[in-house]
Amino acid sequence: MSETALDAAFFVRWMTAAAAVIDREADRLTELDSPIGDADHGRNMQRGFAAVVKVLADEPPATPGAVLVAAGRQLISSVGGASGPLYGTLLRRAGKALGEAPQVSAQELRSALGTGVDAVAQLGTSAPGDKTMLDALVPGVAALETSFGAAAGAAEEGALATVPMQARKGRASYLGARSIGHQDPGATSSALLFAALADVAE
Ligand code: ADP
Ligand code: MG
């Protein structure tokens, strides 16, 4: 993993790139949320990340931790669906774990995201294998040990691996065995967050 120091501007670029890829992929995320949900995941994420970009532009935070805390807060307050509080918790808790350092290493980011993912699992009472965002987040964070590109690949594989799973959490779980054969929308958007991270880290 590279030793590059990541500053607040890097984290703003990450959130901005995430908003852009979510905007491009919003229709696909909503389509994935149609057979096993309520067809709002793309719109939820689009609304949330547009609000994140706006708050970061209006009041640019001075540290990496403050960027993630501000982004997480904004997701919690602007997204109504289950994914808003879950993604909001991920970023807010990761941001708090980074503390007030003006720059952080990739390893510190990995560790902070690990703390955020644990908080998501606790809030969602969910675990890998339940066919949720955790199925992309957990392998993505683990592969950050290697590189940002490896993390993006592992998260994408994790999202694809949700297809044969039966959902045990969230709306999709109401469908029981009928949730099998569909890719989880939240795992798919999580993979997009790692793709955006790999893009800005290049
Ligand atoms: P809603 O389900 O309220 O319509 P979204 O459609 O925006 O919210 O988000 C759905 C996604 O949220 C799912 O695809 C799944 O990845 C994630 N999710 C739902 N419940 C949980 C949970 N308990 N733990 C982890 N992730 C969850
Ligand atoms: Mg939904």
Image: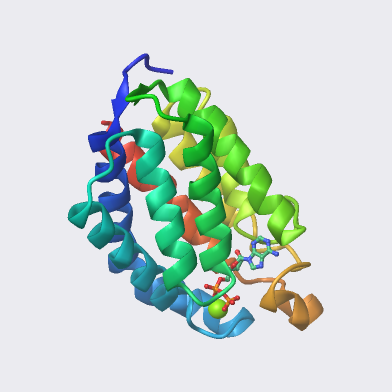
Residue 144 as seen in the image, left or right of residue 45: right
Residue depicted at 49% across the width and 54% down the height: 190
Q: Is residue 37 above or below residue 60?
A: below
Q: Can you give x and y, in whole percent of width and height, for residue 130 in the image?
A: 75, 59
Q: Is residue 161 above or below residue 117?
A: below
Percent of width and height locating residue 76: 49, 65
x and y percentages locating residue 51 in the rendered image: 31, 66
Residue positioned 32% across, 26% down in the render = 6
Farthest residue in the left direction? 58
Is 10 placed left or right of 164 in the picture? Answer: left
Camera-nearest residue between 120 and 199: 120
Query: Splitting the image into 4 quarters, where does residue 172 fall?
Result: bottom right
Tell which of 4 and 135 is nearer to you.
4
How many labels sit on residues? 0
Q: Is residue 126 left or right of residue 139?
A: right
Q: In which quadrant will I find the C terminus?
A: top left
Colour convention: rainbow
Q: Quadrant of ligand 1?
A: bottom right
Q: Is residue 29 above or below residue 20?
A: below
Q: Residue at x 53, y 33 (%)?
A: 97
On screen, residue 167 versus residue 81, left or right, reads: right
Report if residue 62 is visible in the image: yes
Quarter-of-image position of residue 52:
bottom left
Query: Which residue is situated farthest in the top direction here?
Result: 3
Say if residue 192 shows up in the picture. no
* Quadrant containing the N terminus in the rendered view: top left
The structure residue drawn at horizontal position 24% and vertical position 43%, both measured from the top left corner, is 13
